[in-house]
Image: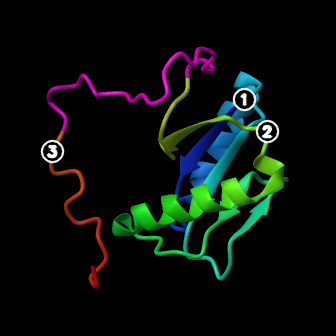
């Protein structure tokens, strides 16, 4: 069974939450969580689908956020039914649910050759 993971942050959570919840409802997908960092503790709210992680919530904190998210999912029994995870950014648009799991790891490469290779510049915190 597949669990969709949307990575967001406190700054974007209101817009991300509304957009993702609307999209997933339209697609009839109930198995997803929205990850936000900067929390005091690691906790999941099943009603909002939001997983709060105690970690750096800035751009450079993504590795910490993902490691703590995977640990939380692995150790929490409510997630034990999931055998596949798909990590996405909070601005990802899903056009149809994923149904085929014939690979263990996959990704998507943006075919837009005009996309900026400097999109990460200016996203890190001053203390990074």
Element type at marker 3? loop
Q: Tag on residue 101? A: none
- Check the image and report above or below for 125 versus 100: below
Mark nearer the N terminus (1 vs 3): 1
Residue 46, image x, y percentages: 83, 54
Mark nearer the N terminus (2 vs 3): 2
- Check the image and report above or below for 111 versus 32: above
- Check the image and report above or below for 27 versus 17: above
Q: Quadrant of residue 121?
A: bottom left
Residue 90 belongs to the span the image colors magenta: no
Q: Which residues are magenta?
A: 95-115
Badge 2 vs badge 1, beta-carbon distance below 8 Å: yes
Give the labeled residue for mark 2: 81
State how far apart marks 2 and 3 are (Cα).
Answer: 38 Å
Residue sitting nearer the eye, 115 or 88: 88
Task: Please tell me whether mark 2 or mark 3 is closer to you in this view.
Answer: 2
Mark nearer the N terminus (2 vs 1): 1
At x 55%, y 26%, the residue is 94
Q: Quadrant of the C terminus?
A: bottom left
Badge 1 vs badge 3, beta-carbon distance below 8 Å: no
**Principal SS element in the magenta part?**
loop
Give the labeled residue for mark 1: 1
Residue 32, image x, y percentages: 69, 41
Give the labeled residue for mark 3: 117
């Amino acid at each position: 069974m597949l669990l969709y993971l949307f990575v967001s942050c406190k700054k974007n959570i209101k817009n991300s939450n509304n957009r993702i919840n609307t999209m997933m409802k339209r697609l009839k997908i109930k198995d997803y969580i929205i990850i936000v960092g900067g929390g005091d503790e690691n906790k999941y709210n099943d009603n909002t689908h939001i997983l709060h992680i105690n970690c750096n919530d800035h751009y450079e904190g993504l590795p910490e956020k993902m490691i703590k998210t995977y640990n939380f999912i692995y150790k929490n029994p409510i997630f034990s039914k999931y055998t596949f995870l798909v990590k996405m950014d909070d601005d990802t648009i899903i056009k149809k649910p994923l149904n085929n799991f014939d690979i263990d790891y996959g990704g998507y490469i943006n075919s837009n050759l005009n996309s900026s290779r400097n999109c990460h510049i200016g996203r890190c915190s001053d203390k990074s």
